[in-house]
Image (cartoon, rainbow, N blue to C red):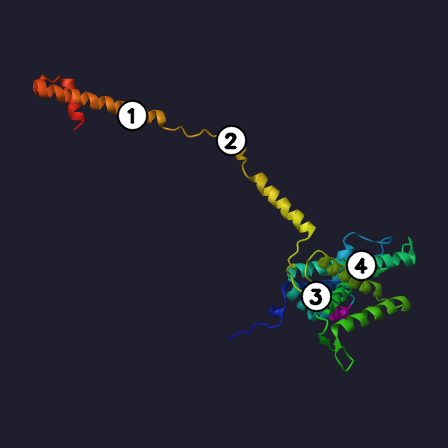
Amino acid sequence: MTTERNPFLPGIPPVTKNLLLINLVVWLTDATLERTAGIHLSNILGLHYIFNGFSIWQPFTYMFMHANFSHIFFNMFAVWMFGAPLEQRWGSKRYLTYYLITGVGAGLIQELVWFFMYGTVPAAAVVIGASGAVFSILLAFGWLFPDVRIFIFPLPIPIRARILVIIYAVVELFEGIASADNIAHFAHLGGMIFGLGLILWWKHKGVSSMSSESNGETSRLQQWWQQRKRKQREEKKPHYSDYHYQEPVRDEHTQEEKSRKEAEIKKEIDRILDKIKLSGYDSLTAEEKRKLFEQQ
């Protein structure tokens, strides 16, 4: 028996892959709970108007909710098509940061639009879907790959990515003002606005929009963090200035004493040898004989 690896999922970068899986699992869970228990997760996780049913987690969770199969299919198709190249260019951490910030930002823009529409009236307004983050991905793709040509059904000719971004932005602005449908057009524009703002902020801080590496400049925040880490490392080191060390004692006195003793011994041996010459060996005392043998 032979097995073949699925070439689709292994080829998708990790964050994009996990976003696809998480959104699919949430959508399936929502559909199952709705059919079996009558529970609508959008009532809990969807982004409600701040004056009617709003919860603090909703600006984050709403982007993982979808109304139906076509809603999740087209959003996730865009995440796969445009998000994967971004993650490969930026790196997973930076791409995930971009996705989440722009998704939350899109929701905040929608809340602001609702406020201008309803004021403090508790309107029953709810938005769900990853479209805000998707539109920010589309903008970033057009920024990084402006001349890539994309086929958009039913147009018979490919369109440059930067032109497509402009077209989408204009259409969403027009639809948001003139249309009365239930699509959150201003959330789509909000994702683009936050995406553009984040890219420009990274550029201002010296981070290249073309890669996951900086262009050689270090932001003030990075400099502060690096200085803080260095200071913490220095504080953890023992303060050697708090310890007192005794200088090694030089052996000057010991050497002088040794030299003096050696001179005395030599003088004593010379005296014993002179005594042997005059009186013979038998004239030596036991102590003199001991000293003589110790030096041999």
Amino acid residing under circle 2: Tyr
Q: Which residue is mark 1?
A: 258
Q: CA distance from mark 1 to mark 3?
A: 91 Å
Q: Position of residue 127 (x, y in %)?
A: 82, 61
Any part of residue 33 in sight? no
**N-term mark: 4 or 2:** 4
Is-magenta flag for residue 96?
no
- Disc 2, SS: loop
Mark sitting on residue 107? 4
Classify 10 Å Cα crowding around label 1: few (below 14), some (14-19), many (20 and above). few
Amino acid residing under circle 1: Lys
- Quadrant position of residue 13: bottom right
Q: Is residue 90 left or right of residue 240?
A: right
**Farthest bottom residue in view:** 156
At horizontal 79% and vertical 60% (from top left) the residue drawn is: 106
Mark sitting on residue 24? 3
Q: Position of residue 86 (x, y in %)?
A: 68, 66
Asked if disc 4 and disc 2 are in contact, CB closer than 8 Å, the reply is no
Amino acid residing under circle 3: Leu
Classify 10 Å Cα crowding around label 4: few (below 14), some (14-19), many (20 and above). many
Amino acid residing under circle 4: Gly
Asked if disc 4 and disc 3 are in contact, CB closer than 8 Å, the reply is no
Q: CA distance from mark 4 to mark 3?
A: 20 Å
Q: CA distance from mark 1 to mark 2?
A: 34 Å
Image quadrant in which the C terminus is located: top left
- Read off the magenta span: 68-75
Viewer-side label of 1, 2 = 1
Q: Position of residue 248 (x, y in %)?
A: 41, 30
Viewer-side label of 4, 2 = 2
Q: Which residue is mark 2?
A: 243
**N-term mark: 1 or 3:** 3
- Relative to 120, residue 1 above or below: below
